[in-house]
Amino acid sequence: MRQKLLALFQESHGRLPEVIARAPGRIEFIGNHTDYNGGTVLGASIDRGVWVALAARPDGRRNFVSDLTGRLVTLAADTPVRQEGAAAWVNYPLGVLAALPAFGLPVPEGFDFAVVSNLPPGAGLSSSAALELASALAFLAATGRRDVPPATLAQIGRQAENNFVGVPCGILDQGVSAFGRKNHLVYIDCRGPRFEAVPLPPDAHFWIFNTHTQHALVDGLYTARHRECLAAAAALGVALLADVTPARLAAELASLPSIEGRRAQHVVGEIARVDQTVAALRRGDLAEAGRLLTASHRSSQTLFENSTPALDLLVDALTGRPEVFGARLTGGGFGGAVMALTSPRFDAAAASAVAAAYAEKFGTAPEVLHLRTGDGAAVL
Ligand code: GLA
């Protein structure tokens, strides 16, 4: 990827970069829509991600290029306007630049910027958070700041997403990309937020089945779920759903409108499952971890209503196999991908059988990825 990045930079900007930073994509292991509810979540940083190269320019111009479009986007430093259409990807680095002053950090004026990625877009592996973190590290290194702690990087990325891109996401994607560690999961208590590494048992394998489907209104649906969760919390008299215990919710469920009730049941149940999963992983019980992952999916399917028939078919086909510990939708939902936690015995032939069952019903095969964990965001 480094060679590809250097070639793109040279070809687009006619010189070599001064700094290169990389940030990984992530798998949401368990903890679906818990982050913005103040709950807990577990994620894994993967060995694929986004690489950003940067060199300062004295003339104040900002030139962006990506291997996805290949087209140069040129902006003046004093016009950080939100971009539309093919240039919309620039909103992620622009959002980071807009967020830096709030953290007391310097903003580079002019620069040449290039990005390459080996994360498949639309697979729910969070290419946007990876782009935010790699951009933040490159901007900060260019202004002589290589000392910014990962918790701050994660907050900068989240603020870019919330305030500039306009998605009311939680800290999951940016937190995992910042704190990821090979052979570990990242546990986040989103309230602090507090981050902790949880060792992954050696026999745990991850597979991703990307449907390449996405609900046309996916951003609007995510925002709607966010709103419904806040409404449920307000109806229960708390700031965030993480403040409600399962016992209290059970006692008060009948007083909630039915949609808010189902959303609250999912989030409160999911927070409990995250903590049970951490305990299962710490004692090396992958069968129990897998059971909790599948329970998470069933809760998405029936209570949070962010699954789709395509995702459900994959979960059904996967969980019918003895080498699969569990499977669930990963990320926001409404399309995207399913992840499976498997033993090493799950192989390409098993993955093809699942893909074939999917293709028979939906006409096209899903993209299949066998992913490994990888380290978190860093300047290279
Ligand atoms: C997306 C968001 C995250 C999180 C998940 C759902 O990935 O970016 O913050 O809310 O959806 O758990």
Image (cartoon, grey):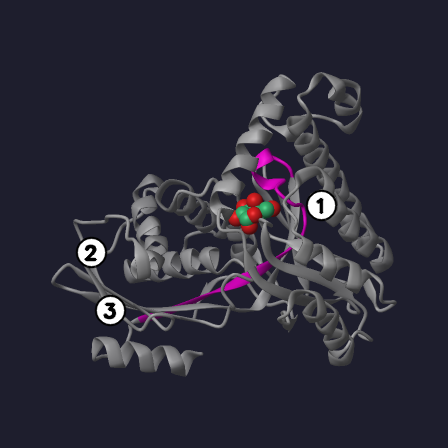
- Mark nearer the N terminus (3 vs 1): 3
- Across and down, in percent, residue 265 comes to 72, 32
Q: Which mark is residue 109?
A: 2
Q: Which residue is mark 1?
A: 301
**Pointer 3 residue:** 72
Region rendered in magenta: 19-39
How far apart marks 2 and 1 lie (CA) works out to 47 Å
**What is the secondary structure assignment of the residue under circle 2?**
loop
Closest to the camera, between mark 3 and mark 2, is 3
Front tag of 3 and 1: 1
Asked whether residue 137 is in view, the answer is yes
Q: Residues within 10 Å of mark 1 (few under 14, many from 20)?
A: many
The image quarter in which residue 270 lies: top right
Residue at x-position 77% and y-position 28%: 246
What amino acid type is highlighted by mark number 3?
Leu
**The N terminus, quarter of image:** bottom left
